[in-house]
Image (cartoon, rainbow, N blue to C red):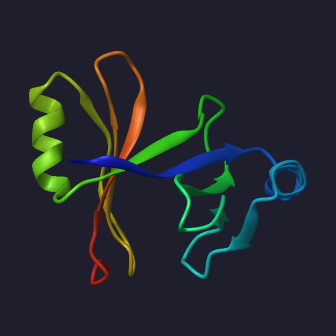
Amino acid sequence: MPRVVHFDIGVEDPERAIKLYTELLGWHIHKWEGPMDYWLITTGKQSEPGINGGLAKRQDPSEFTLNTIGIPSVDEFIEKITAAGGKVLQPKMAIPGVGWYTTCQDTEGNAFGLMEEDESAK
């Protein structure tokens, strides 16, 4: 069954946000070695319940925290979301070395991400 596997936090000032989350919650945050400015967040031990996430500079003032759901096939779920009355907000895109990603919106206007793991994605 698909589950939430990651969250993204859009921020105005990444350094300021990193300072807050590390001091307030003790999260470990480090810059990703990928093709964009993105910081990976580790919220706790892998042996404990919970998920990890990331943060990036907000691209749009309306961006909020976005949960990403792990799925077996982005293409399959794009068809499912549109058939169920939702929308695709961002076309399928590769995250190099990670997988395939899209952003969707449910029937109530809530955005969420869908991620298909595939290390060969380019």
> Residue lying farthest front?
47
In this view of the protein, which residue sits in the foreground, 67 or 13?
67
- Residue occupying image coordinates x 52% and y 53%: 49
Q: Is residue 32 above or below residue 23?
A: below
- Residue occupying image coordinates x 79% and y 56%: 14
User: Is 45 on the left or on the right of 23, as rendered?
Assistant: left
Q: At which x and y percent is residue 112?
A: 40, 38
In this view of the protein, which residue sits in the foreground, 18 or 103?
18
Q: Is residue 77 above or below residue 115?
A: above
Q: Quadrant of the C terminus?
A: bottom left
User: Is 105 on the left or on the right of 30, as rendered?
Assistant: left
In this view of the protein, which residue sits in the foreground, 32 or 22?
22
> Residue lying farthest top?
108
Q: At which x and y percent is residue 70?
A: 31, 55
- Residue occupying image coordinates x 58% and y 38%: 65
Give the number of callouts: 0
Q: Is residue 58 visible?
A: no
User: Is 20 on the left or on the right of 101, as rendered?
Assistant: right
Q: At which x and y percent is residue 8?
A: 57, 49
Residue 116: image quadrant is bottom left
User: Is 104 on the left or on the right of 72, as rendered?
Assistant: right
Q: At which x and y percent is residue 58?
A: 66, 45
- Residue occupying image coordinates x 31% and y 81%: 119
Q: Is residue 67 visible?
A: yes
